[in-house]
Image (spheres, helix red, strand yellow):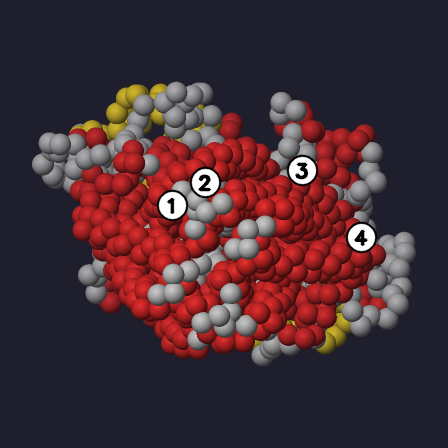
Amino acid sequence: MLKLFRYLRPHWVAAVLAPLLMLLEVAMDLLQPVFMARIIDEGVMQNDTTRILHTGLLMLGCAGVGLLGGLGCTVYSSIASQRFGADLRRDLFRKVQTLSFRNLDELSTGSLITRLTNDIVQLQTMVQMLLRIFVRSPLLAIGSMIMAVIISPKLAGILALAVPLLFIVMFLLIRATLPLFSKVQNKLDKVNTVLKENFAGIRVSKAFVRAGYEKRRFHEANADFTDASVKTQRLVALNMPILTMILNVSIVAVLWFGGKNAIDGSFEVGSLVAFINYVTQVLFAVSSVAMMLVRISTAKVSADRIQEVMNTQPDIVSPSAPVKQVEPHGEVVFDQVSFAYRADSGKPVLQDIQFRAQPGQKIAIMGATGSGKSSLVALLPRLYDVSAGSVRIDGVDVREYDLAALRERIGIVLQETILFTGTIRDNIRYGKPDASDEEVVAAAKAAQAHDFIAAMPDGYDTVLGQRGVNLSGGQKQRISIARALLVRPSILILDDSTSALDMSTESRLQQELSRLMSGRTCFMIAQRVSSVIDADKILVMDDGRIVAEGTHTELLASCELYRDIYQSQYGKEVSAHG
Amino acid sequence: MARTDQERSAQDGSEQGGSEQERTQRSDHAPDLSMRGGRPTHGMTVAKSKPKNTFGTIRRIWSYIRPYRAGMAAVFLFTLVSTVLSLIAPYLLGSAVDDYIIPGDYKGLAGLCAVLLSVYAGTALFAWLQQHVMVKVSQLSIQDMRRDIFARLQLLPLRFFDSKTHGELMSRTTNDIENVSGTLNQSVTQLIASILSLIGSLGIMLYLNLWLTLLSMVTIPLVMLFTKTVAGRTRKYFSKQQANLGELNGFIEETVSGQKVVQIYRRERHAGEQFDAYNKKLTEASIQAQIYAGTVGPVMNVLNNVSFALIAAVGGYMAFQDWTTVGIVVAFLNYSKQFQRPLNDLANQFNLVQSAVAGAERVFEIMDTESEYENEEPMQDAGRLRGEVVFDRVSFSYKEDVTVLNDVSLTASPGQTIALVGPTGAGKTTIINLLTRFYEIDSGSITLDGMDIRLLDKDSLRRKLGIVLQEAYVFSASIRENIRYGRTDATDEEIEVAAKLANAHDFIMKLPEGYDTMLVSGGSNLSQGQRQLLTIARAVLADPVILILDEATSSIDTRTEMHIQSAMRTLMQGRTSFVIAHRLSTIREADEILVMHQGGIAERGSHEQLLAKRGFYYDLYNSQFKLPG
């Protein structure tokens, strides 16, 4: 956590001024009871009205100075903490931008978002409190103790007993509650899971008339959660009463011993009252310090999570001396390629992949889910790096190209369509922000997206909601294909990106693609035989290996797996004739 | 503490709710007992979400507390006792000075100390008892409330779920309810205690000394003036900060979710620039908001100090003039604190209660939404059916004016397979939604064995239908339980038989724990094909008269698809089946093909008949299935 504090360094003036100004406020607060004691002991008891008046004015003056300190602290702590958070957030975001796909998989998107949002806010809040109350309470506690010792070293002995006792009790309570919190959290997660499942699966639960069953399931989670909450909160409820009890017993002790001394004349009444005031302050401050420890421990979790991202090394970076741009033809060679998502575990996703795509060819890849199709194409733009062997484009290993230049040449449409908030136009020209409107329309037309876009009231200026929520799956796919086509890559990869299109749309798209991509290499992962039928080469994959390659007719004759696939889609008789 | 932690998690990932962020700590300087991640803000910055019908809503909340009213009465009693005791203590302190210390009465002092000790002990004891009971009362009432909203959700029509995002629904069922729970647990009793101690300390102060009482109140107009001026501004800046934070978080969420695309298109730098702009805007706004909010602590502090100084000085002077005693001044120093603290807190607590009432209102709003079973006559049970389905001139629209089905008629005889084909958006799924009565038709009629389905009990109707949806939804339970979903009273043997029929048995047995394998929510530890097989097993187990299959399996590889297909074929035997068909083989085997186009049935007939027609189907078939060469 300390490492992250270096983000305070650029704002050190504010970060130093804030606690100093707080010190001023605390000092002024601490003076109040002494002055009050003076009013009683030197003014009232000794019949000195000017003393009363002067001291009163002095108290008001101190309060005013304290106000300045307090306000100053607020201003500087706000500046320091907010800027700290902003800088940290910026760097974390920049870091995320550099992460490789593998890093992203490992850290998981959801968790990265939480880190960038909640965790940063946590830390920011912590820093702000650190500069305000985290300074104030200990200062107040220490200051009050000093004042107490000055007033009466003997009575201060009571504090010497009470303060450690308070710490121990708080510590024990916090230690007992923390594990309960995470238990409550788990139970709550269960409640939320049932809820979420019922929102997502509402059709299923209705179709099977399972309301009763779901209610029972929810009731279990609900009751468990309630039990855990009651238990935890009851423990928490012990906190305040015990705390105030210790405080009040100390006050009674002070009153008794101090009162005795006041009666026998060794102690003054005003000092006694002031002492009681200090005791109250010490104990409240101490208990708030204990609470801060809890806060710090939660902030530490956030800090660790941020640190983890900061320390992640992007495992795919541009080479320090990239090859000069080679004349781009689009020849692709996979040479003895093996690949595993994690270096340490399990069996490789791809093994011994060996094939060659001539410039301008259309290569189709078929195979079962999990057979390694997506992994294979992901190696081309270096979304992942091979574990062994090499992938070469125009004779050069992809790892030797400048990363940005490599990716610029390759257009890839991912299986999962991702669109961004903004207009359809902006989404299509995402890869080439300076594209003209004509280019956008041409790309959309080729991707068979123009018609439905034009039919929308705002056409290309239609604003998409987050992740394109107002479009159908097929529409989203077509926009993301248009986005890739606009870049006019020399190698185009479609990773099962036409699955949601109906077949007539798809076949029109295929025709456009053949036209547009003539002379360019095109990789196409597909499930439907109709999508791959005109490919120059079809790779049939099974379990991470290429089990057959050839054209449709060749494979139909030679590859049983391919025949199976074909028959599953067209039935036996057709294939017999076809 | 627990509550606040839960709140945070409930929002995890989803929108940063204003209510949490703006929820407050009591004061900058009091120990912060919450573990809230929000900013340390102050009294008057609580989000103002005003309930529409406060009184009615409170009465309704009360109906949840009613079953525990004995506990609630105890809580009131305990609060009363502990507040009264806490009011006595400063009086005793003052009297210690006046009656025993100054006169020099050891014995009296000892006695008073004993009384004071027991008063303090009583305060602590009753404060604890109050919390101890209140925790249970509030948690149990909230448990009931959660139960009721869930039960209601089960009854609501699909239309309702279509109109709300999951995030919105989650927020109502978690955040809003937690909000009510937290407020019940703490704010309500605090509010009572605040009011009691306000009245009590005022009473005692007046009893002790009128002039000192007035003096203690000198700062109150200042507090109010300050509160008024700062509150408005703070709220303004806070909502600006919230809005900016929302924008930034939205941007982060979208960018990071789409990180892979950002990188593929090399837009990292651009994203960074956009981020900086949002980040800068947020920082400027939040510095302002934090500064304004932060002034409350020091200003309240100084006003307390001023009040303290005035009482000490003027009180001292009055004691000197013998208009009052030192002990009373000492008591006043304490009472004025006891008087001011609740005053500062009241506004805050009131706002918390108000926002909880508003939250409860949103919860009740769901509970009041008309269920799909409402306004129905006592229904006829579907009884034994043969499975004849007739749509007679059915029209339907999801939204007004946007007709989805127009005048559709069709007949399915028992045991027939009807294939629905056509482009996306032609209304195929709608036919299914109407048959299940997920939605109600606008005009025409749908009959089952001659009975209008609107006259049938919805649940008994749905029990006769077996539905396999395109998105194979599984629940976080064991595989066995997921299959049993089809029929709750099925034995383990029956489940296995169903799984075998659905071609699911083999892969299940290969899993380490077989049928007891736990699925994670959404079933991501199974492939989509495997999930689809499970849902088919579910439908097999349900043994429906009429089967509805949405066969789109675009993301399933074709070999798995073959398994699914043969499983489906088994399932379809002897049942009236509606299939949204994508595969040629299904289409060819269907007894009747309905070609849907623009909300109507464009053509109907068998495969051969339709091909011979050389119409819409012929084109569709050629573009989709005809192979070159």
Element type where label 3 sits in the image: loop
Q: Amino acid at mark 3?
A: Ala
Q: Amino acid at mark 1?
A: Ile
The chain holding disc 3 is B
Say which quarter of the image contains residue B613.
Answer: bottom right
Is B325 rendered above or below residue A351? below
* Residue B513 as seen in the image, left or right of residue B488: left
Could you give the CA–CA distance between mark 4 and mark 2, rounded to whole angstroms? 80 Å
Could you give the CA–CA distance between mark 4 and mark 3, rounded to whole angstroms? 22 Å
**Label 1 packing within 10 angstroms: few (<14), some (14-19), many (20+):** some
Residue A467 pos. (x, y %) = 42, 56
Picture residue at 61% right of the left edge, 76% below the top: B52
Q: Nearer the viewer, residue B347 or B30?
A: B30
The chain holding disc 2 is A
* Residue B7 as seen in the image, left or right of residue B493: left
Picture residue at 76% right of the left edge, 56% below the top: B74
The chain holding disc 1 is A
Could you give the CA–CA distance between mark 2 and mark 3, rounded to whole angstroms? 64 Å
The label on residue B477 is 3
**In front: mark 4 or mark 2?**
2
Say which quarter of the image contains residue B487.
Answer: top right
> For mark 1, what is the residue?
A151
